[in-house]
Amino acid sequence: QQQVKQSPQSLIVQKGGISIINCAYENTAFDYFPWYQQFPGKGPALLIAIRPDVSEKKEGRFTISFNKSAKQFSLHIMDSQPGDSATYFCAASLFLGTDKLIFGTGTRLQVFP
Amino acid sequence: NAGVMQNPRHLVRRRGQEARLRCSPMKGHSHVYWYRQLPEEGLKFMVYLQKENIIDESGMPKERFSAEFPKEGPSILRIQQVVRGDSAAYFCASSPAVANYGYTFGSGTRLTVV
């Protein structure tokens, strides 16, 4: 119930391509779905987040697509750049700001020039 | 305020010693969360604290681990009698005492048990 399943485990994309990472959850009470980017030796940094009352949110080259009925959400990185090479984590929480985040297992993205 | 401050950045302990990890939340934040990240793995929730209270410790191992967030000073994650399996990166995040605000993570403490 509290798990967030993330796929793929690793992803290799050519520069300029689209990177797509998927997550699925079971608990329909989750109310906040963020994506975090982590570079080696650094802490996770919030990339983009969505609440379940919208189906899509776009910030620059990053888009979250949210499918409430399927209990799935995904991160799309358009025009992927070598600087996007990092590990990406999806997460979910019951109450934004006053509850723990449950993280997916992570996707290591490599973007080649 | 430079954000969530964690220290030390790196900590080496021999098996059986104690490890103390510190986390100073962002100014104005009174909620602290601790996570553990094993090499090549995701972040696992350990404990959620508010000032002087443990709210959720469902992710804490039953033995050797404890956490506190006193009225004054940083939050402390304490690991007694460390074992090699405790080697990991430990991250702290903070949020304000208001719903609908996000979480800010520190840069972590990398614990190595030798």
Image: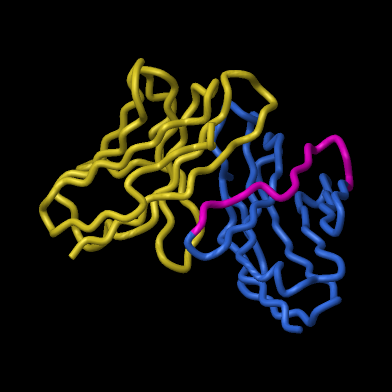
Chain that is coloured yellow in the picture: B
A5 left or right, relative to B38 = right
**In the image as oriented, which residue stretches furthest toward the left?**
B16
Please identify which colour was used for chain A in the image.
blue
* Residue A19 lies in the magenta stretch: no
Q: Quadrant of residue A27?
A: top right
Residue B85: x %, y % from top left: 26, 61
Q: Which range of residues does the magenta coloring cover?
A: A42-56
The image quadrant where one finds the C terminus of chain B is bottom left
Compared with A10, B16 (above or below) is above
Seen at 88% across and 39% down, the residue is A54
Q: Nearer the viewer, residue B107 or A37?
A: B107
Q: Quadrant of residue A93?
A: top right
Residue B67: x %, y % from top left: 31, 33
Residue A36: x %, y % from top left: 64, 52
Seen at 78% across and 42% down, the residue is A50
User: In this figure, what is the number of numbered marks?
Assistant: 0
Q: How is the image coloured?
A: by chain
Seen at 40% across and 42% down, the residue is B6
Residue B64: x %, y % from top left: 20, 43
Q: Nearer the viewer, residue B89 or A5?
A: B89
* Residue A43 lies in the magenta stretch: yes
A24 left or right, relative to A4 = right
